[in-house]
Amino acid sequence: QQQVKQSPQSLIVQKGGISIINCAYENTAFDYFPWYQQFPGKGPALLIAIRPDVSEKKEGRFTISFNKSAKQFSLHIMDSQPGDSATYFCAASTGKTSGSRLTFGEGTQLTVNP
Amino acid sequence: GAVVSQHPSWVICKSGTSVKIECRSLDFQATTMFWYRQFPKQSLMLMATSNEGSKATYEQGVEKDKFLINHASLTLSTLTVTSAHPEDSSFYICSASLQGYGYTFGSGTRLTVV
């Protein structure tokens, strides 16, 4: 019940294309859904996060779509650039509770070809 | 924004010695700190959760006597890998959280035990 399932495992898109990564969860107590970007040898960096009271959040080229009834959320990267090539992790937590852990997806290796 | 400083960024040590990794929240007082381990091309594995002034809570399968965590203040947590062996070689990442404000990750420490 604590798992977050992420797909695809790897993704290759052309420069300027749209990258879409999907995640699904089971625990309905989750109330905070962040996406992280990780470059090799670095720690994860927060890209964008959403709470379940909204269905979509956009920040620049990054958009989270959230479907509470389906218990799914996705990351859309518009106008993908070679610099976006990295590993992306979705995560979930009961974020309002102090000390609650993040449950991570398995990660998606994104490659954006020039 | 919230910044977490992790040091060292990489360390090589001899088998049987101990290594200490520091994690500091620079501009906020972290309610909770988390320590993760990450193997190549895999997701982050939570090792332990610590609150200031309290004993760390270790995940199942993590040896608490081998991975010593000290959270002496709201801005500093340390992970000491005791009697390190080659199988302890990995990428270790800390994260700090402040209730209601999300999670910030350190830049990670690459540990190589020779």
Image: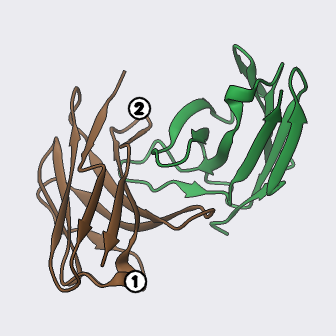
Left/right of residue B24 with respect to residue A80 in the rendered view = left
Residue B26 visible in rendering: yes
Label 1 sits on what residue type? Glu
Left/right of residue B39 with respect to residue B85 in the rendered view = right
Q: Which residue is mark 1?
A: B87
Q: Tell me the distance, in whole angstroms, between the alpha carbons under discs 2 and 1.
A: 35 Å
Label 2 sits on what residue type? Tyr
Please tell me whether mark 1 sits on a helix, a strand or a loop.
Answer: helix
Percent x, y of residue B16: 18, 86
Left/right of residue B6 with respect to residue A15 in the rendered view = left
- The residue located at (47%, 49%) in the rendering is A41
Residue A74 visible in rendering: no
Q: Quadrant of residue A78?
A: top right
Q: Is residue A75 above or below residue B52?
A: above
Q: Which residue is mark 2?
A: B101
Asked if labels 1 and 2 touch by Cβ distance under 8 angstroms, the answer is: no
Percent x, y of residue B8: 23, 50
Which subunit holds the residue at mark 2? B
